[in-house]
Amino acid sequence: MAFALWITMAGTTAPTPLYPVYGEEFGFTPFTVTVVFAVYALGVVLGLLVFGRLSDQVGRRPVLVAATLLSVCAAGIFLLAQSVAAMLVARVVSGFSAALVTGAATASLTERLGQHSRVKPATLALFANMGGLACGTLLAGILADLAPSPLRTPWVVMLGLAAIAVLGVVLNGESSTHRSGFSLQFQPLHVPAEIRSDFLRSAMAAGAGFAVLGVLTAVTGLFLGTVLHESSHSLTGLVVFLAFACTALGQLLVRTLKPTTALPAACLGLIVAAGLIATAMATSSLAPLLVGAAINGLATGVAVGHGLGSITTRSAPQHRGASVSTFFAILYSMLAVPAIGVGVLIRETSLRPAGETFSAVVAVLSLGVLLSLVRTGRNAA
C-alpha cells in the first residue's frame, strides 16, 4: 500500500526536470509549462471534490487499483506524447490518480497496521506521499541525465514501477469492513465554524508555501537553464526534492512545537524563504535557491501540520472529512493558480522580475497572516 502511494505520487512530479527538454522538443513557451503543471493540481482538486469519499463507498482496493492504473496510463501517455495536448491529458490523468490514491492508501494503511502499531500509519503515509513527490523528480532527473533518451527512459521506469504497484494492490485483500455503496456527488466544502479563523490562517500560510512549491516545480528547470546555464536535469530534481522532503520533515517538526508558536514560526519561515528565492533571482545564485526551497518546505510542512491538527482535534467529528477536503482543495488551488500567474508575468516581462514579484507577494501574504496572529494574541491577552 505504501509503495502504491509512493510511486503514484512520484509519477506526478516526474515531469519537472523534463520540462526544458519538452520545451525544445515541442517548441512551447514558459507560460505553457506553467499551464501544463497547473492542470495537474486542478485535476487533484476536482478528483477530491468528486471522488473524495469513493473508498468509503466501494472499498479501498478498487480505488487503489483505479489510482495505480491511472498512474500507469499517465506514464504511458507521457511516454508516447508528441504534443502539448497529450501532456495536458497526461497531467489531468495524473491529478486524478493522486486524488484517488491519497485518501484510500492512508485509510488502508490505518486499517492494516492499526493505531497501536509501532510504525504509525499516519507517519508511514506521510513519508510515502511526500517521499514520492520528492523522489519522483529526482529519479526522473537522474535518468534523464544518464539515459540516451531523456523523454522516454524516465517514463519506461515509472510505467514499470506503477505496473508493479497495480499488481501489489490487486493481490492484497480488502482492508475495509464497511462500505456505504456508490453514489456520485460532490464532496461539500466546509470551513468549521468553531475554528474558522485558525483554519483560514493555516490554509493561507500553507497555501502560500504550496504556491512556492508549485512555482518551483514548474520553472526551476527554466531558471537553472536560462539564468544559471546549468543543463543538469538531476540538479533541477534536487531543488524540488529538497522542497518536498523538507515539507515532510516540517509536518513531523510541528509535533514538537506548541500550537501557539507553530503558525507564527511557519509564517516567519515563509518570509525568509521568499527573500532567499528573490535573492537567487536577483543575483543568479544557486545557493539561496537551495536554502530557500528547504526553508519553504519546512515552513509549509509546519503550516499544513498545524492546520490538519486543528481540524482533527478541534472540529466537529461529522464535518472532519469535508473540512480536510476543503483544506486540501485550497492548498492545491494555491499550487496551480499562482504558477499560471507567474507564467503570465514571465511572458510579459522575463523570469527574474516574475520570480521577484512572486516572492514579494508570498512574503506579503505570510506577513499578513503573521500580523493577524499577533493582533489576535494581544486581544486574547
Image (cartoon, rainbow, N blue to C red):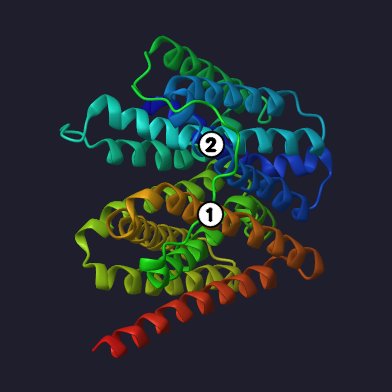
Q: Secondary structure at mark 1?
A: loop
Q: Please state if 95 lies on the left or on the right of 120 as rendered.
A: right
* Residue 54, x across and y down, in percent: 51, 31
Residue occupying image coordinates x 46% and y 12%: 170
**Disc 2 marks which residue?**
98
Residue 97: give x, y in percent of width and height: 57, 32
Camera sees residue 1: yes
- Residue kind at label 2, given as amino acid type: Ala
Kind of residue at badge 1: Leu
Left or right: 80 as drawn, with respect to 6: right
Measured from the top left, where is residue 98 in percent x and y?
53, 36
Can you tell which mark lies on residue 7? none
- Give the mark, 1 or 2, whose residue is nearer the N terminus: 2
Q: Are marks 1 and 2 in contact (CB under 8 Å)?
A: no
Lateral position of residue 227 relative to residue 26, left or right: left
Q: Residue at x 73, y 51 (%)?
A: 35
- Check the picture and name the quadrant holding the C terminus: bottom left
Separation (CA) of disc 1 from disc 2: 19 Å
Furthest residue to the top? 171
Judging by the rendered image, the residue that carries numbered circle 1 is 189
Q: Is residue 140 visible?
A: no
- Specify the quadrant of the image occupied by residue 2: top left
| Front residue (pair 27, 100) | 100
Q: Who's the residue at 41% across and 84% down the image? A: 371
Query: Considering only vertical position in the picture, is 58 above or below 200?
Result: above
Q: Quadrant of the N terminus?
A: top left
- Residue at 61% x, 34% y is 94
The foreground one among 97 and 379 is 379
Helix, strand or loop under label 2: helix
Q: Residues within 10 Å of mark 1 (few under 14, many from 20)?
A: some
The picture quadrant where one finds residue 148 is top right
> Could you say where residue 262 lies in the image, as x and y percent from the top left?
29, 68
